[in-house]
Image (spheres, rainbow, N blue to C red):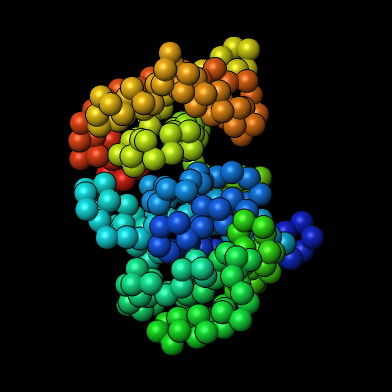
Amino acid sequence: MPEDTEKTATGGETRCGFVALVGAPNAGKSTLLNRMAGAKLSIVSPKAQTTRFRTLGIVMRDTAQLVFVDLPGIFKPRRRLDQAMVNAAWSGSQDADLTLLLVDSRIGLTDEIREIIARLKEGKRPVWLVLNKTDLIQRDQLLPLTKAITDLLPVEEVYMVSARSGDGVEGLLDGLARAVPPGPYHYPEDDLTDLPDRLLAAEIVREQVFLQTHEEIPYHATVETESFKVRKDGSIRIDVTIYVSRAGHKAILIGERGQRIREIGMRARKQLEGLLDAPCHLFLNVKERAAWDRETARLRALGLAEYG
């Protein structure tokens, strides 16, 4: 037995591996990660390019520890922030033991997917194809789509799932547990993510900004946790700043008599209390800051400075 291999309490050999989730924006990577983890680790929004940095989700499956890396969607970058996100995605894929290429089966083989396939062919890591949202199309459309993709990219396995309903996800997890290499666990067995609580708080607020403002507030908004303090009574005080690029966006976000920002805060607080298992006191501040997405400090807060 290799020196770095361990056994569980029941005598089974431990396995552990990093699995990268790669695909175009809105392929459903964050939804799939949350479904596999059984908890909310990555924010989900109808807006494209919601995920901005690498999120680790840790899933125990039998004697295997699966460490999922939810990467930003791969797209054509226009700004410094965009380029940092795309660089982070490819870096995460190259570092993983195995890559899942997630494709929205309703949309099929787009130019974006062709570009991703071309890049994946350059690497030497194993790739599995995962067709998502298969509950939303006719089953007889899946085999032609599978053939079109696998003709372009050799893959080791093909799975058809619905991250939304959970259909096919258990089989995917079983396959991954068998495929990751033997070795000791990288994280404690009860960990769900390596995402710091400060960053988790900012992401939950950012999700509510997306959900509560719909198309009114553009993608050019970011959220940072300024202070995260556990109080003597066990409750947590969290101070969060939302940066927008225009004065008009600030007014929309605050809403008439502060109604919208209160709603964002209330919904985010309830989610955070469930995730942190403690009462939370959440305070939101909105600041106008033009061109925030080109500032190194803002990229650093998103964990993207090294990629920008």
Q: Position of residue 262 (x, y in %)?
A: 49, 19
Q: Is residue 253 above or below residue 204?
A: above
Specify the farthest residue to the right: 10
Q: Position of residue 4 (x, y in %)?
A: 57, 64
Q: Is residue 69 above or below residue 269?
A: below
Number of numbered tags placed on the structure image? 0
Evaluate whether residue 100 shows in this view: no
Residue placed most toward the observer, 210 or 225: 210
Evaluate whether residue 151 shows in this view: yes
Q: Residue at x 46, y 68 (%)?
A: 107
Position of the N terminus, as image quadrant, is bottom right
Q: Residue at x 38, y 47 (%)?
A: 52
Query: Residue 16, located in which quarter of the rendered image?
Result: bottom right
Q: Residue at x 52, y 84 (%)?
A: 144
Q: Position of residue 298 (x, y in %)?
A: 28, 35
Residue placed most toward the observer, 59 or 181: 59
Residue placed most toward the observer, 92 or 16: 92
Query: Residue 233, located in which quarter of the rendered image?
Result: top right
